[in-house]
Amino acid sequence: MLALAGFAADVIELVPRQLMLAIAGLAVIGVLGMALGQVTAGPLKLGPLFAFAVTLSDISLLGLGPAFWALAIGVLASRLLERDELKALREASTTNGPATP
């Protein structure tokens, strides 16, 4: 078993770096697809998608990290681009009342 691990490490060194990165990227596509499906599962799609992209970008401005900017940009995107969906959600929450656990 240990000899097989050494062989695998040697094979990785023989494969060009770009090819290894491409193979690793292909391995992650399924996970990324599932994450994007979960992000856009609700009635609001663009705001969460923007927030997801900003979080992945690792942006840091004014001493604030990506979590803050993801929240701020996601809310802004939903308010600007998904007004009708937000209005429907607000109306549904006021007519149905707050959810009780």
Image (cartoon, helix red, strand yellow):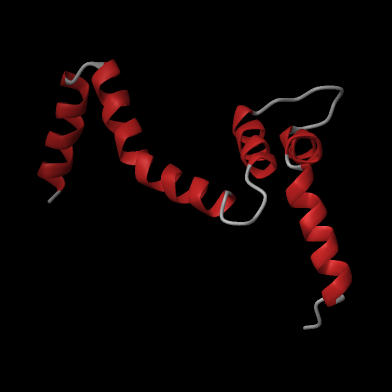
**Residue at (35%, 31%) from the top-left corner?**
25
**Residue at (87%, 76%) from the top-left corner?**
97
User: Where residue 45 sits: x, y (%)?
Assistant: 63, 45
* Along the line of sight, the residue nearer the viewer: 90 or 15: 90
* Along the line of sight, the residue nearer the viewer: 49 or 11: 49
**Residue at (16%, 19%) from the top-left corner?**
14
Left or right: 45, with 14 as reference point: right
Classify residue 73 by image quadrant. Answer: top right
User: Where residue 54 sits: x, y (%)?
Assistant: 66, 32
Q: Is residue 22 above or below residue 72?
A: above
Left or right: 84, with 32 as reference point: right
**Residue at (83%, 68%) from the top-left corner?**
93
Q: Quadrant of the C terminus?
A: bottom right
User: Where residue 75 sits: x, y (%)?
Assistant: 79, 41
Q: Is residue 4 above or below residue 12?
A: below
User: Where residue 95 sits: x, y (%)?
Assistant: 86, 73
Left or right: 97, with 12 as reference point: right
